[in-house]
Amino acid sequence: MSSTAPAIARAAHPVIQRFFDISLYLLLFTGFAILAGTGKLDALSLILGTSALLTRGYLLLRRIDVNLPERWTTYFTLIYLVFFALDYFLISQTFIDSLIHMVLFAAMVKVFSVHRDRDYVYLGLLSFGMVLAAAVLTVDSLFFALFCVFVLLAVMTFVSMEMRRSWITAEPSGPTEARELRDLRRLPGSVARACILLVVSIVVGTIALFFLIPRKASAGYLSALSSRSDLSTGFSEEVRLGEIGQLQQSSTVMMHVKFAPGTRVPRDLRWRGVALTTFDGRRWSTPHENSTPQPINPNWALGLTGSNPRLFAGHGQFVRYKVSLEPFGSRVFFVLPQAQSINGKYQQIRIDSTGSIRIADNARAVTDYVVTSEIAPPMPEHRQPIRDVGLSEMVYLDPPHNLDPRIKKLAEQIAGEEDTPFLKATAIERHLANHYGYTLQLPAVPPKDPVANFLFERKAGHCEYFASSMVVMLRTVGIPSRIVNGFRGGEYNDVTGSYIVRAKDAHSWVEAYFPGYGWYTFDPTPASSSGPTSGSRLYLYMDAMREFWHDWVLNYDTGHQNLLGTTLVRQSRLRFDSVRDGIQSLYEGSLRRATAVRTHFQQHQNAWTLWLAAGLTLSMLLLIGPGAFRLARRLRIAQKPMLEPHTAATIWYTRLLKLLSRRGIRKIPAQTPQEFLKAIQPEPLRQTAARFTVHYERARFGDSAEDAEKLPELYREMEAVSKDK
């Protein structure tokens, strides 16, 4: 027996073990959900991870114990070491993605191969590793919400792990059977409630410290994580034909735009990003310029009125708006043309000859900024060209090398009969929009000349093909032009009053130069069949939460802290003044009413005295009357028991009990009258009490009037006997 005792003692109580298993499983599942919520997992990893965890959850629910042999685990690990090298060099080609795949593999294998206590610790560390990887990949509000759940489950897991360890290592206080029968069913609920209270306290305290701790002005919390990503490739100084089309296939939110109160929102929203000038047939680029960074003045404003002067300057519509970019690593400021000033927490920015505005510090990304733009009025169609020496036209007139001669012939055929350059450009724009189709599907094999293939063979493409074709055709007929990449439109969120701009809103259009006016916007792309996105109310509320997270957490700085403090002080002051005015008004009203009552009392003193006396009398009657009525009724029934025998029996028996209580003989509530008789001493007193009890029971339960009438006489006999004894 002694040899088997240690083996039995090493088994945890079933309730504790199951609570620990469920907590650890939920911890691992939440860690995977956080990683999957970043949207950066590939489809295969997402499917395999979800399938493995759901299978493990099913086995846990059905109490089926399935463990892979340790030998298999070793073989899988050795095989994956080879796959890791292939993943790093050929598949993912990035260390972060390869490392995430390795963490997922280790977690999925280990969850089916728990053989020792340290394997539980490994699973906890792997779940934390997935959360750590997610923290590198995203700074979204969903991460914070799931992380709070993860912290709660982590506390529950490690508390239950310690309870399990303590139970296993503790000396048994009795036979094993007795310990197994111990009732611990309430333990999981108690531990869960305690952990929830602890985690809520931690989260609330952390939020309070986050908003209250002084901080210096910066680019915003976690802004360093917004490194260059695939979402910013379409807005760099070099863009391959087709990159904007790839970006349009995503619904990722790129930025939020909120117009200032009272600002008239333009009907056509074009968020200008980069303008590209040089086209080699496949790739657009802008020659590198050694432009001097322009500092932002102490008022955090930069005047841009000198970039791209126009004839209409000062005569257009001015709009003011705030742009909040998601952390996708943008170095470009997206603005409505033409931007007149930019306000933001940036020291220097660069403006190239195309009017593209970039941040000068390559180590930082653009986040939030406020812009004032002037919307150009329409240009008269028949304005005649005038000499304008403010533009170096050669870079905007160069067609790509090895230009297909059919392109120039088509452009001259379309624009040949028009009188002015503006009408020529309008004719080319109209021809492309009316004779070509829109599609996001790219050719399976990239053509040698994408523009010629689009114009004469496929005759369908997305915005980049339309814009590139128009720029090339304009240059062949002598009109300076360039392509612009940015965003167009956006979905209005009435919850926050801002516009949601997604990756699918990415767009390319054309800017052509006309002397005497400046750069004019053309868009030859026909409308796509998808139409605008109409989000559900739930999505709009979620986006509002996302925008709040971006504004008040990711970019929380001294400015937000001062605004929050000022708002709290102002609201507190307003609330204090409101309470004070309310108390003062209540006091003055009470004083007026008291003065009026006193004046009325002095004028009608006799009437007040009469009414007060009547009120006091009525109050006394209401307070004393019911009790006095019940007392009078009991006295009447006691004097005439035949009126209500059962009630009279109760009254006289109660008096008997009080009489005996004064002699030290007290009846216990659980005793019956007959049982109480046995406790009465001496004998004469018990005999008299026995006769009283016989008549009491007949009157009480038999409603006998004759027996009830004998109770007063027997009571007086009991008084006489009790005095003698």
Image (cartoon, helix red, strand yellow):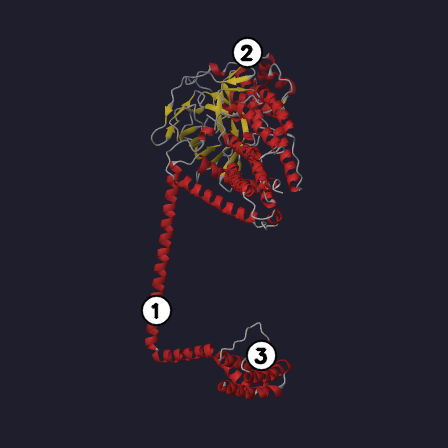
Quarter of the figure with the N terminus: top right
Q: Determine the residue located farthest toward the front in the rendered image.
A: 2
Residue positioned 40% across, 78% down in the render: 611
Indicate which disc, 2 or 3, sits on the residue closer to the N terminus.
2
Residue 334 seen in the figure: no
Question: Label 3 belongs to which residue?
Answer: 677
Q: Which amino acid, mark 3?
A: Leu
Instruction: Tell me, yes or no, whether the two marked residues, 2 and 1, touch with CB atoms within 8 Å.
Output: no
Relative image position of residue 522 (x, y in whole percent): 53, 25
- The residue identified by callout 2 is 401
Check disc 3: other Cα within 10 Å, few if <14, some if 14-19, many if 20+.
Answer: some
Q: Earlier in the sequence, mark 1 or mark 3?
A: 1
Residue picked out by circle 1:
594
Q: Quadrant of residue 299?
A: top left
Which corner quadrant of the image does residue 446 belong to?
top right
Kind of element beneath mark 3: helix
Image-quadrant location for residue 436:
top right
What residue is drawn where x is 58% and y is 27%? 101
Q: Nearer the viewer, residue 404 or 422?
A: 404
